Amino acid sequence: EAGVVQSPRYKIIEKKQPVAFWCNPISGHNTLYWYRQNLGQGPELLIRYENEEAVDDSQLPKDRFSAERLKGVDSTLKIQPAELGDSAVYLCASSLVVGEVFFGQGTRLTVV
Amino acid sequence: KQEVTQIPAALSVPEGENLVLNCSFTDSAIYNLQWFRQDPGKGLTSLLLIQSSQREQTSGRLNASLDKSSGRSTLYIAASQPGDSATYLCAVIYDYKLSFGAGTTVTVRA
């Protein structure tokens, strides 16, 4: 069974440019999460989806971040415009409603 | 707000020694607790999931215990190997989301 797939693995952009990350969760998992991990810290939740509905986006910086999960499957996280402080690893994860959570390999974003 | 703490932040042991990693959380109203392993530059790999009704969970050389009332979990890794070198993160499922500690970075010396 395929795990959570993310792309790209690495991205380097100049500040003020837009960037997008893509995630394909494990088949059948209705819950999808986007987390951000800064160096030396644990991941922090940005947004949680139940099917296509964003049920927890309280930690998403909505002035520059947006996310969508069309048809309750794949998801895209976008940053526009990017700032230097956005450099981090962006992790996508999926699970059944309250089951074991599985993570993708992450996208390492560097903003220069 | 749920706070998750992992002590120590780093640990170095000789090969063959048993590892004991600690995790504490402030609110005992958790649904599950999950232990992860993270290799440098990689995503998180799930090691063990302990449901709130369970006291422990085992997989191979790994054993994790959970004491909800005291807000603690311990991950034991028996007979450590150099390949066990990684960062180990504990996370509690609380309010339908994972809240993570900062991790314990383990180095197993050959």
Image (tube, helix red, strand yellow):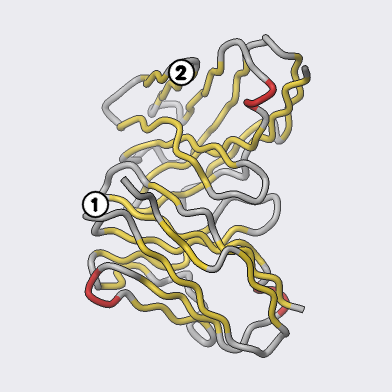
Which residue position holds label 2?
B63
Taking the image as shown, residue B75 lies to the left or right of residue B106, namely left
Question: Among all residues in the image, which is located at the extreme front?
Answer: A1
| Chain letter for mark 2 | B
Look at label 2 and name its amino acid: Asn
Which residue is painted at 41% across and 30% down in the image?
A: B48
Asked if A109 appears above or below B35 in the picture, the reply is below
Q: Which residue is mark 1?
A: A97
Which residue occupies 62% across, 45% down? B102
- The chain containing the residue under callout 1 comes to A
Q: Position of residue B53 (x, y in %)?
A: 26, 27
Q: Secondary structure at mark 1?
A: loop
Question: How many marks overall?
Answer: 2
Q: Quadrant of residue B106?
A: top right
- Residue type at mark 1: give it: Val
Taking the spot 44% from the left edge, 16% from the top edge, the residue there is B60
Task: Classify residue B82 by image quadrant.
Answer: top right
Name the side, left or right, on which B12 lies relative to A74. Answer: right
* Disc 2 packing (10 Å; few <14; some 14–19; many ≥20): some
Count residues near mark 1 (Cα–Cα under 10 Å), then give few for <14, some for 14-19, many for 20+: some
Q: Position of residue A14 (x, y in %)?
A: 72, 84
Rendered residue at 55%/64% (across/down): A90
Instruction: From the viewer's perspective, tell me whether residue A1 is left or right of residue B11.
Output: left
Which percent across, then down, holds residue A105? 52, 54
- Above or below for A52 versus B94: below
In this view, A33 is above or below B98: below
Say which of A105 and A89 sits in front. A105
Q: Are marks 2 and 1 in contact (CB under 8 Å)?
A: no
Q: Which mark is residue A44?
A: none
